[in-house]
């Protein structure tokens, strides 16, 4: 809020050169600016020494949101992928992370041999299998 009789900020600090009435007016302006600042601060000035539980509550809420929207679904997908890899058997139609479709020809500990065409076999890491196809 700007008043018509407002002076530049420098005049508030160089009070030695001001007559007594202007000095009193400038101190009143400073006091009014300070009270306006407290009024604009709202609850922060009134809270005083109350502990800030609101911040802790917001952190807990944010963690809950992250858990239910990001962490939990990722854990669920990882569990499903682990079950898929453990359930692989010779003859399954699979799809790899690179988009290769084929039939499982052999399974070793960490390596799966996939036949992509008649007589064409490739070896991939077991974790590269992302899905199986239903035979039609």
Image (cartoon, helix red, strand yellow):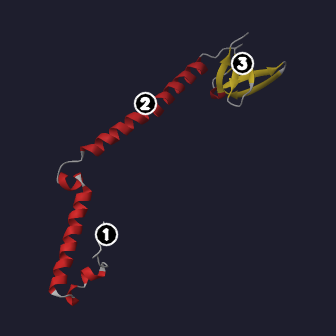
Circle 2 Cα neighbour tier, 10 Å, few/some/many (<14 / 14–19 / ≥20): few
**Does residue 15 appear left or right of residue 65 in this picture?**
left
- On the image, which quarter does residue 20 sit in? bottom left
Relative to 125, does residue 37 appear above or below in the rendering? below
Mark 3 or 1, nearer chain start? 1
Q: Nearest the camera: 93 or 21?
A: 21
| Label 1 element class | loop
Q: Residue furthest front?
A: 4
Label whose residue precedes the other's in the sequence (2 or 3): 2
Q: Is residue 37 above or below residue 85?
A: below
Establish if 72 lies above or below 59: above
The answer to whether residue 82 is left or right of residue 30 is right
Locate residue 113, reporting x and y percent: 73, 23
- Where is residue 115 shown, x and y percent of the image? 78, 20
Q: CA distance from mark 1 to mark 2?
A: 50 Å
**Counting residues from the N terminus, which is met first, the one under dot 1 or under dot 2?**
1
Q: Which residue is mark 1?
A: 2
The one nearer the camera, 63 or 82, is 63
Q: Looking at the image, which is closer to me, 39 or 121? A: 39
Q: How many marks do you count on the picture?
A: 3
Residue at the disc numbered 2: 68
For the point 72% across and 11% down, the residue is: 135
Q: Residue 107 placed where, x, y %?
A: 68, 19
Across and down, in percent, residue 62 comes to 38, 39
Q: Residue furthest top?
A: 136
* Numbered label attached to residue 65: none
Quickly name the residue at label 3.
106
Tag 3 and tag 1, C-beta contact below 8 Å: no
């Amino acid at each position: 809020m700007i008043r018509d009789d407002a002076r530049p900020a420098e005049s508030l600090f160089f009070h030695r050169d001001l007559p007594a009435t202007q000095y009193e007016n400038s101190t009143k302006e400073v006091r009014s600016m300070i009270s306006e600042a407290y009024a604009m601060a709202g609850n922060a000035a009134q809270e005083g020494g109350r502990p800030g539980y609101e911040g802790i509550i917001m952190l807990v809420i944010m963690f809950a949101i992250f858990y239910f929207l990001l962490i939990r679904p990722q854990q669920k997908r990882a569990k499903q992928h682990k079950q898929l890899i453990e359930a692989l058997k010779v003859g399954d139609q699979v799809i790899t992370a690179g988009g290769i479709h084929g039939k499982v020809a052999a399974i070793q500990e960490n390596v799966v041999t996939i036949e992509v065409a008649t007589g064409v076999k490739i070896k991939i890491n077991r974790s590269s299998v992302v899905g199986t196809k239903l035979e039609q």
